[in-house]
Image: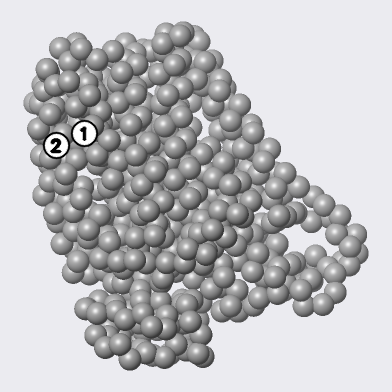
Amino acid sequence: MTAAAAETRSDTPDYTPAGGRTGGFAGRPEGRVRRGGRWIERWEPEDEGFWRETGERVARRNLAFSVLCEHIGFSVWSLWSVMVLFMGPEYGIDPAGKFFLVAVPTLVGGVLRVPYTFAVARFGGRNWTVMSAAMLLVPTAMAAVVMEPGTSYGTFLLVAALAGVGGGNFASSMTNINSFYPLRKKGWALGLNAGGGNIGVPVIQLLALLVIGTAGAAHPRIVAAVYVPLIVLAAVLAALFMDNLAPVTNDTGAALDAAREPHTWVMSLLYIGTFGSFIGFSFAFGLVLQNQFVRTPLQAASLTFLGPLLGSLIRPVGGRLADRFGGARITLGNFAAMGLATGVVIYASAERSLPVFLAGFIALFVLSGLGNGSTYKMIPGIFHAQALRRGLAGEEAAVYGRRLSGAAMGLIGAVGALGGLAINLAFRQSFLVAGSGTPAFVSFLACYLVCGAVTWGVYLRPAVRGRRTGQGARAQAQARAKVVGEADGPDGPDAAAGAAEADGERGPVYAEV
């Protein structure tokens, strides 16, 4: 495979799939005609020679501009988490109304993640990145228009709902980058893509701090105005430097298969615990500080950005650790730590101790970011393991894994985002009933305990294994080694698989369905 072959952008319908196959990543699907520039016709990231010669350079370029566009998408998605800090008594909105206002874009963004997942194959990764970035202009401009006292609460809800398009960008961006990278690189690449996007949350919060500290809380429109040229710039750069992968196609059968796969819903639950916590806490942090610790808008804004910033920066580390030690192990330890941090927050909330509260809450942000990286690494690993268990190998196993993991990511990302909605609604109810966030934090602690138990029970629980013989048994052992990290020994997956075939060994249940 040459560099020229990998980067061919064809305006003609002439095409024959490699080896006569249709679908997958070895070539363009039969009968699918791509017209226009910036289409890559052949893409084989699992081929180490191809990856070294051409694939890595192309993938990195697309990753860089994907991060930029997703970053701005997250900023727009979290726009109303900072707008509510500008809403003083003159707006006539109580704390419960503000929590609901920031929950609305979370809901819309979560729902949009499903169609956004399929948009990549329908329009092309580069083309959809340009379109989805341009759509961010609508909620940003509308927010600048309506942010003034006297605007009805219904109008605020409608405009906040439009900001949900920024949340949808995550699903299409992750699906696109998942297609560019080989399995061995996905943890780091997906973590970097998501972490770079997540940083959009603290960046807009820092901008709000700057505006409140200089112009005052009466000028929220400045925040929206700053993002208009940035959105245009991101869309233009994506159009100039990103690529479409012609072999990527929408496979409704894959979506249905992913929806029927129990692991999709298990991982959705785990992602609620990690990403749902991150985005929910990011949107609610400032309001909790204002209402539970009576902070002014400037005081709240000066603290709000810290947690999302650290959580975003550490997400790629979670992916890297999952690559090295296994996603399930990192995820289990992470949920245990989140439970401990939540206990600290509950204590501080009851004692009204702001320093202890901040330490515990920021630890939750860091751990949620770490868990975001480790859980997303598990998704392609689980489905690749499923392929090996079915007796597939090599490129066939890679195609199967990408097919289902790409479809599953949209569903998992959507459900995880709805966890952020649940967190804001829990805070709303908690402040309505108890006047504090303590009951909400108790419910979050219960959630983390459940997620940890599920992680152990499904992916790490020891089970007696008898002697396995034959190719299928060895494939199962190799798959298990890949998911939970056994393959990281000095002799690689083959040694781990051989060890797993010993009589009576107790090994992790990696993908029981």
Eyeballing the image, is 10 above or below 345? below
User: Looking at the picture, how far across and down is residue 236, in whole percent?
Assistant: 15, 62
| x 31%, y 81%: residue | 33
Eyeballing the image, is 467 above or below 355? below
| x 79%, y 71%: residue | 473
**Quarter of the rendering containing residue 450:** top right
User: Looking at the picture, how far across and down is residue 166, in whole percent?
Assistant: 29, 45
Total numbered labels: 2
User: Looking at the picture, how far across and down is residue 259, in whole percent?
Assistant: 55, 53
Q: Is residue 502 left or right of residue 479?
A: right
Residue 142 marker: 2
> How many C-alpha atoms fall within 10 Å of the one at disc 1: few (<14), some, or many (≥20)?
many
C-alpha gap between disc 2 and disc 1: 6 Å
**Quarter of the rendering containing residue 161:** top left
Q: Is residue 288 left or right of residue 347?
A: left
Quadrant of the image containing the C terminus: bottom right
Eyeballing the image, is 501 above or below 430? below
Q: Is residue 71 left or right of residue 464?
A: left
User: Looking at the image, do the residues carrying marks 2 and 1 touch, with CB atoms under 8 Å apart?
Assistant: yes
Q: Which residue position is annotated with label 1?
A: 159
Q: Nearer the viewer, residue 445 or 344?
A: 445
Circle 1: residue type: Val
Q: Earlier in the sequence, mark 2 or mark 1?
A: 2
Circle 2: element type: helix
Residue 403 shows in the view: yes
Circle 2: residue type: Met
> How many C-alpha atoms fall within 10 Å of the one at disc 2: few (<14), some, or many (≥20)?
some
